[in-house]
Amino acid sequence: MKKDHTKLLRLEEVAVALGVSFQGVRNHIAVGDLVAVRVGERGVRVREEDVARFIERGAASREPLAGRQEPSTEVIK
């Protein structure tokens, strides 16, 4: 498995960066607007670059998205 040294953000950090609630971040992940990865059994993180991409697409301002991604099932241990 390839090592990825990308910074992973907690959902609370993502919420602050996007100016939305913790639940708002979870909702964006659930519908595939924002890609998340599992860390261990229960942890969920978002790659810093995915937050930047999300902001660039305008998703944080609730603009319609051209193509939603399926939520990630990747597990990082």
Image (spheres, grey):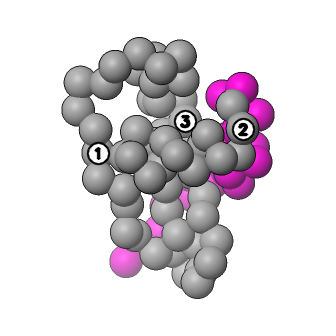
Image point (71%, 26%), residue name: 19
Give the residue number, with chain letter if any, for mark 3: 51
Whether residue 41 sits left or right of residue 50 in the image: it is: right
Find the distance from the CA under tag 1 to the CA under tag 3: 14 Å
Specify the quadrant of the image occupied by residue 20. top right
Magenta span: 1-19
Whether residue 41 sits left or right of residue 12 in the image: it is: left
Q: Which quarter of the rendering shows the C terminus?
A: bottom right
Give the residue number, with chain letter if any, for mark 2: 21
Image point (37%, 60%), residue name: 72
Find the distance from the CA under tag 2 to the CA under tag 3: 15 Å
Give the residue number, with chain letter if any, for mark 1: 69
Tell me if label 2 and label 3 are in contact, CB under 8 Å.
Answer: no
User: Closer to the N terminus: mark 2 or mark 1?
Assistant: 2
User: Closer to the N terminus: mark 2 or mark 3?
Assistant: 2
| Three-letter code for the amino acid on which mark 3 is drawn | Val
Q: In front here: 63 or 35? A: 63
Specify the quadrant of the image occupied by residue 66. top left
Whether residue 33 sits left or right of residue 14 in the image: it is: left
Q: Residues within 10 Å of mark 3 (few under 14, many from 20)?
A: many
Q: In front here: 62 or 15? A: 62
